[in-house]
Image (spheres, grey):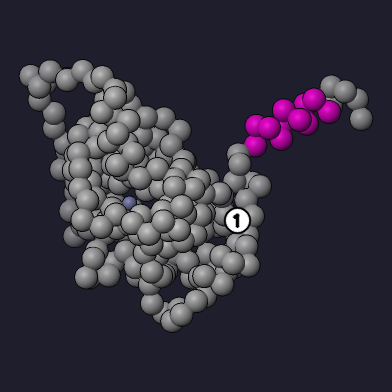
Amino acid sequence: MKISTLSTLAIFIIGLPQFLFAQNFLPEERALILRGDTTQGMRIIQSTVAAENEILTRPSSNINTREPLLPLLLKRMYIAMTDTTNPGIGIAAPQVGINRKVIWVKRYDKADAPFEYYINPLINWSSNLMRKGSEGCLSIPDARGDVLRHYAIAIQYQDSLGRSHEEIIEGFTAVIFQHEIDHLKGILFPQRMREQAQTKYETVATTTELFFRELPLRP
Ligand SMILES: [Zn+2]
């Protein structure tokens, strides 16, 4: 093989999206997903337990979309998140002890606000404009705080067939995506609050009136 061909190949491989190298679950991950009653949600781990906080603050890796246990993980995460005793509007796999890039988000920007899952999501772009809002987390008991989040973001993710998608998300739904994708980086919202306390922000003039076009209702 000629050097030029080799270097072209090297550039090609470096340029490939990381999820193409995604692995299947490890044996211990498989055991955790299959533990207990598999028709029930997995337990949501808590930052107040040292060993669990270690999992919550660890970066997650990509998952192969063809992994056979992925649908069961998604289902058990969904059940955990929609538990009526402590319901959430999003969840990330590290919160059930699996350090993989899988999230659920309630799409408040869509009619009837459905829950949707995203595999190997990442943020490709974010606006300089930020919004401030109160956040809590299923993994941090009794804590709430004001966090600044990018007003708009562009995300990239895979669906269950491995197809790649890109989408621009705004407003409160973008907040949920940023909170959940932060979980995949091992970042919990109090860390964002600490970072932001050290950063200067400029208030945007409120003389500009902002509007949202109402979403069409389904018949
Ligand atoms: Zn959270």
Pick the front one: 31 or 149 = 31
User: Three-letter amino acid code at disc 1?
Assistant: Asn
Q: What secondary structure predominates along the stretch shown in magenta?
A: helix
**Residue range corresponding to the magenta coloring:** 6-16
Q: Quadrant of the N terminus?
A: top right
Mark 1 lies on residue: 64
Looking at this rendering, what residue extends furthest in the left direction?
207
Residue sitting at 27 percent across and 70 percent down? Answer: 83
User: Secondary structure beneath disc 1?
Assistant: loop
Looking at this rendering, what residue extends furthest in the right direction?
1
Pick the front one: 44 or 133 = 44
Q: Is residue 198 left or right of residue 104?
A: left
Q: Is residue 219 left or right of residue 44?
A: left
- Whether residue 151 appears in this view of the structure is no
Residue 136, above or below 30? above
Residue sitting at 17 percent across and 20 percent down? Answer: 203
Pick the front one: 47 or 27 = 47
